[in-house]
Image (cartoon, coloured by chain):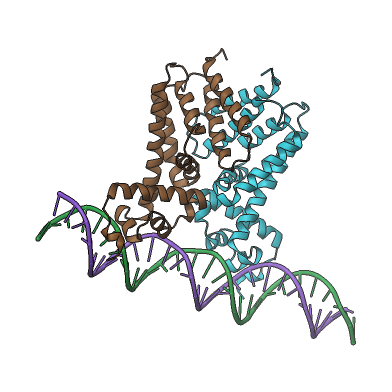
Chain colours: A brown, B cyan, C purple, D green
Amino acid sequence: MTEAHRRKKQPIELRQQLLDAAATLSVRAGVGNLRLDAVAAAAGVSKGGLLHHFPSRQALLEALCEECLSRCDRRIEAELAADPVVAGRFSRAYLQVMTGVEVTERERVWGLLSVMLFAEPEFRDRWGRWLAAHLARHDETGQSVLFDIVRLAADGIWLSDMSGENSDPSRRAAIIARLRTLTLDGPEAE
Amino acid sequence: MTEAHRRKKQPIELRQQLLDAAATLSVRAGVGNLRLDAVAAAAGVSKGGLLHHFPSRQALLEALCEECLSRCDRRIEAELAADPVVAGRFSRAYLQVMTGVEVTERERVWGLLSVMLFAEPEFRDRWGRWLAAHLARHDETGQSVLFDIVRLAADGIWLSDMSGENSDPSRRAAIIARLRTLTLDGPEAE
DNA sequence: TGAAACATACCAACTGGACGGTATCATGTC
DNA sequence: GACATGATACCGTCCAGTTGGTATGTTTCA
């Protein structure tokens, strides 16, 4: 009947659009204020269409969380592959990904969303497990508190990025650069 | 008529109880899932009673935010007063307060709540302004990226504390100790 | 002084809108 | 034609906020 029916059906693309829309709206108004109607509308589809892909609100949120994690994964893997120095490699990649250097606005949304999902109690554990698994896999856990500090500071930057662009960009860059060199100095004697 | 009517009226205490209840419930289920009924019940009062003190849900959340900030203020001030070394004093106090060494469970709730409120878009700016004001007042902004890193890492610890007690406490303590010494080394040449 | 008059603190029941979810129908694709 | 995809209409529930009360404090004034 309507025009929407007549268009080419591309379920995979739509699914992605729905997730993108959900991410954007979550970041703008908070995960708790995410409304199915709004997500569907933003993706140019009816609520029925949305519920076809995600049978419930909960399912949508979980998919959102998984998408977040897998995006992180992909970017981390890319960074790891491009880094020849083994020591502190993971922490460096983590820093790079979390601080989101040279990243598109669309990627940025997903970064912010990560923090917001982290604040949701139902997804905290999921995140905790993700990080623990990665740390175990790259086995930097026993290395040095310096690496820990670098990663923690990366989280801090990530967090402060959420509060708008109030911080001086050059200062931010200097901090990131300094953190990066910290991981390259090698773990000195404690 | 009912027993509740007959009890001693202590509006100030009740107000505090309501805020405490709201904080606890927010941390447990997320700010977005905070229900007025539940808050009222947890404080041993009816929803009407709650709405007498906070005319709307929004008002309650704002009061919650203010309470959070003023609690931070008080603890920061206490740390500052107890620290004879001027250089990096604020960053040290910040680290101490945010990582919440030797803190009661009740205080801990408020710490966690801070992060959750930070994740709420409507309160992000409020927090950003708070921090900016404090940084300006103690004028550590121009000092050293090391101080920045310490504060950012403190945020990171704070954040990771939210994901349950999965981290090794002694390791956590080591990190905090190291961060502390970083602020005491003094700003070396960049 | 004390008791009316007012103000504050709270309760119980209700309402109206928002929103998640379902049921059913229409259309595209293989 | 059979299945996947998506639209429309509708229902039930949840919950913030309203309303109209009752009980407890506090002030005023005869």
> Going by the image, does A177 lie left or right of C18?
right
| C4 and B2: which is toward the camera | C4
Figure quadrant of the N terminus of chain A:
bottom left
| B83 and A170: which is toward the camera | A170
> Going by the image, does B109 lie left or right of A140?
right
Counting from the top left corner in percent of width and height, residue B6 is at 66, 70
Can residue B171 be seen at all in this image of the molecule?
Answer: no
Q: Residue at x 38, y 48 (%)?
A: A19
Figure quadrant of the C terminus of chain A:
top right
Counting from the top left corner in percent of width and height, residue D7 is at 31, 63
Q: Residue at x 56, y 12 (%)?
A: A189
Q: Residue at x 51, y 54 (%)?
A: B32
Position of residue B152 relative to residue D15, above or below, is above
Q: Residue at x 56, y 50 (%)?
A: B121
Position of residue B186 relative to residue A47, above or below, is above
Counting from the top left corner in percent of width and height, residue D22 is at 64, 79
Count of all numbered marks drawn on residues in the image? 0
| A7 and B22: which is toward the camera | A7
Residue B145 quadrant = top right
> Going by the image, does A178 lie left or right of B129?
left
Residue B127 quadrant = top right
Counting from the top left corner in percent of width and height, residue B38 is at 53, 60
Position of residue B32 relative to residue A130, above or below, is below
> Going by the image, does A109 lie left or right of B98?
left
Can residue B98 be seen at all in this image of the molecule?
Answer: yes
